Structures are given as C-alpha cells and as structure tokens.
Amino acid sequence: MVVNSYKPFLKLIRELLLHLVPVLVYVLIIGGLDLQFHLEIYNFPVAIVAILGTVIGLLLAFRTNSCYCRWWEARTLWGAIVNDSRTWARQIIEFCKNGNDNKSASDSDLRRIALRQIAWCYALSRSLRGQDATKDLDTLVDEAEVDSYRSIHNVPNDILLKQAIELRKLYEANRLELFQFIELEKTLTRLTNSMGGCERIKNTTFPLSYSRLVHGLIYVFVFFLPFGLVNVPAVGLVVTSLFLSFAFLLIDRVSTYLQDPFSNRPSDTPMLSLSRTIEINIKQMLGEKGLPPPLAPEDGVLY
C-alpha cells in the first residue's frame, strides 16, 4: 500500500510510456501530415469524438469503482482478521484454566496456540500472494508442525484445523466451559470466513472481456481523436491528443492495479505489515519481551 511516496506513481508513468510511444508516433505523423497537406477535408466531427470519449469515461468510471470495491473489501477483511486474531488470543488467555481450579493454563499451552495464530496470519498473506506459505513459520511453531504443512495445498486452512483440534482438547480436558468453547469456535468461524473472502477475491478475476472492451475503445478513441482536431494548430493537436490519451490509459492502468489487491504490487493490501502488527499485539498479551518492530515502508510502500 502506497503511504507517502511518489516513486510508485513514477513507476506507473514509466510503464505507461511504453504504451504512449506508438500513440506519440501516430499523433506526430497526423500532425505532420496536417501541417503539410492540410487535412481539414478529413475532419471528423468532434461531437462524435466527444460522445465516444464520454462513453469510455463512463465505462472507466464503472470499472475503476468496481476495482476499488474489491480493494476496499480486501482491506476490510484484513481489518476483521486483525480484530479476530486479537480476540482469539485474549479469549485463550482469559478462558483457559487447569483442571477445575482457576489458575491459568501452562505458558506452553497458551504460547503454542497464540503463536500458531500469528503463523496463520503470515501463512495466509503469503498464500494469497502465491508465495511459500511455510516461509519463516519455524520461528513461531515447531519444526515438525511446519514440515507437516509442506505437503498441504491450503496451509492456512490446515493451521485453523489444528487450532480447532487444540480447542477441542482443552474442552475435553475441562480447561474450557461449554460457553467458552462455543465463543472460541465462533471466533475461529469468523477467521475462516475472512480467509474465504480473501480467497474469493483472489480467485475471482475481473471479467477479461470487459477489460479488453474498455482497452480497445480507448485505442479507437486515440485513433479518431487527431482527425477531430485537425482544425486546431498542429501543436495543439499533438498536445491535446497525447494528454487525453495519457489520461484514459492512466485511469485504465490504475483500475488494473486495484482489481487484484493480493498481487504484491505497491497498491496491494499490506498483509505482511498487518501480520506483524498482530504478532506484536499477541506477544504483548503473552507478556513477552524483545518484540519485533513494526514493518517500515520501503520506498514509500508498505507491504
């Protein structure tokens, strides 16, 4: 997620320059021909060009809004993950007890379950980005447990399953009352729902035919635009054509970035940063010292 830098924007402009080069060559050719041969006889009604531009603008607005909704839903889901992860750790610490007394469960029991929740957050963030979901998990859970995840297709889902198994063991050992067990199960269910929502966004691509239609119409607009401006000086024709072309292509590219919030781009949901926040919060709740620092932006981008 871009926080305070112009570098990602400059990178976006550099990518667009590759698309603007053929547009620039085309517009310069039309401008040069207009200077030499006076193309007023080929004047294309500017009203038709304006109508086409308006239609493209409406399509781009709808596409951009739809893509932003996907991006915002992803951020909302991760906000719920942050809250439910804190709730899970708090409930485990608050509810767990040994036998029939009111003493807290052993530190090893609490720590294992709480740290596994942190591991789940990191595993989910890397899984959504198509990376190795087991990376660095050995600092949070046992090596043997990490090895068991390496052959699993959906590592985050398997981690939640282990959490549920641990929860059942606590209940059967009389460390949880029935109401407490149900509340913890509800928290796991909310975490599962959030994970499913993220996977739905990741696996449901924006309709390719719609994207191609908008992209094609932009180039049709770019093709006819200079002929609608042959009555203006050649410099004005070139500058106006390039500016409008760049504006449409820029909006199209921005919406393309927003449509996949888990693609590890600068516009991505900062899942690793949020996972680090969860790690700090849960370890504080466990009373641990030497907490890791929050992730800092890299070139103004928070990952």
Image (spheres, rainbow, N blue to C red):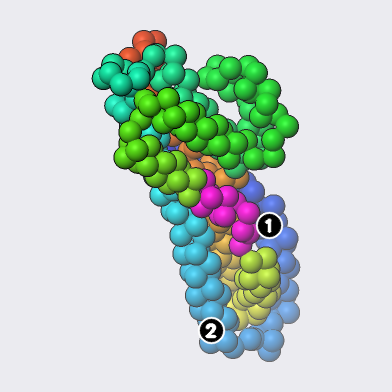
Quadrant housing residue 110: top left
Residue at mark 2: 51
Rounded to the nearest whole Å, what is the CA distance between mark 2 and mark 1?
Answer: 23 Å
> Whole-percent x and y of residue 294?
41, 24
Identify the disc placed on residue 210.
none
Could you classify mark 1 by the number of other residues whose Cα lies within 10 Å: few (under 14), some (14-19), or many (20 or more)? some
Q: Residue at point 44% right, 29% down?
A: 172
Q: Residue at point 46% right, 59% down?
A: 69
Could you classify mark 2 by the number of other residues whose Cα lies within 10 Å: few (under 14), some (14-19), or many (20 or more)? few
Identify which amino acid the numbered label 1 is placed on. Answer: His
Of pointers 2 and 1, the one earlier in the residue sequence: 1
Q: Is residue 101 above or below residue 256?
A: above
Residue at mark 1: 19
Give the camera-side residue of 20 and 278: 278
Residue furthest left in the image: 102
In magenta segment, residue 168 = no
In magenta segment, residue 205 = yes
Report the side of 96 relative to 59 (left or right): left
Quadrant housing residue 180: top left
Q: Residue at point 64% right, 48% down?
A: 15
Q: Main secondary structure of the magenta part?
A: helix
Give the camera-side residue of 56 and 73: 73
Identify which amino acid the numbered label 2 is placed on. Answer: Ile
Res 28 seen here = no
Mark 2 in CB contact with mark 1 (< 8 angstroms): no
Q: Residue at point 26% right, 19% down?
A: 102
- For numbered disc 1, what is the local secondary structure? helix
What's drawn in magenta, residue-wise?
A: 195-206
